[in-house]
Amino acid sequence: MKLDRNINADGLGKYELKNLRTGEVVTDCGVGEEHEFFVIMVKDINAPGGLFGYAMAAMGNGDDEFAEEVREMARRAGLNSPFCKVPD
């Protein structure tokens, strides 16, 4: 399986990033751009690894409260989610 942006002629993924506080849609989200992003859905079977890794990095950077919130989400992810699925 490849990243969605790598199988489309336009190089775009299947999601866009929108700041819900301002309504601004990020348009420079391509490879190497300032707002490049990767979406991890909690229901993704692979999500726990990414989320626990992110939490560990946050803890290593001194943000224990944020790390615990991400760990809490990770505990509900993947096989622990009633919506668990393999990414498409």
Image: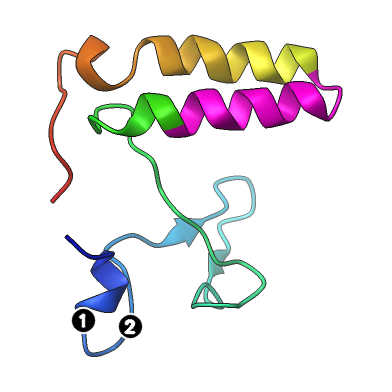
Determine whether 25 is above or below 12 in the image. Answer: above
- The structure residue drawn at horizontal position 73% and vertical position 28%, both measured from the top left corner, is 58
Which is the main secondary structure of the residues drawn in magenta? helix
Q: Quadrant of the N terminus?
A: bottom left
In the rendered image, the residue lying farthest to the right is: 62
Q: Residues within 10 Å of mark 1 (few under 14, many from 20)?
A: few
Residues tagged 2 and 1 counted as in contact (Cβ below 8 A): yes
Question: For this view, does 16 lie left or right of residue 83?
Answer: right
The CA distance from mark 2 to mark 1 is 5 Å
- The structure residue drawn at horizontal position 33% and vertical position 83%, both measured from the top left corner, is 11
Using the image as rendered, state which of residue 18 and residue 22 is in the foreground. Answer: 18
Q: Residues within 10 Å of mark 2 (few under 14, many from 20)?
A: few
**Could you say which disc has been placed on residue 46 in the image?**
none
Can you identify the residue that label 1 sits on? 8
- The answer to if 69 sits in the magenta stretch is no
Q: Position of residue 17 (x, y in %)?
A: 47, 58
Q: Position of residue 70 (x, y in %)?
A: 57, 20
Q: Position of residue 36 (x, y in %)?
A: 55, 66
Q: Position of residue 45 (x, y in %)?
A: 23, 29
- The structure residue drawn at horizontal position 60% and vertical position 14%, both measured from the top left corner, is 69
Question: For this view, does 37 lie left or right of residue 60?
Answer: left
| Element class at badge 1 | loop
Can you identify the residue that label 2 sits on? 11
Instruction: Tell me where the magenta segment starts and ends, as one range.
Output: 50-63
**Numbered disc total:** 2
Q: Which three-letter amino acid code belongs to the residue tagged 2?
A: Gly
Which quadrant of the figure has residue 65? top right
| Element class at badge 2 | loop
Q: Which three-letter amino acid code belongs to the residue tagged 1?
A: Asn
Which quadrant of the figure has residue 8? bottom left
Determine whether 84 is above or below 11 in the image. Answer: above
- The structure residue drawn at horizontal position 31% and vertical position 68%, both measured from the top left corner, is 13
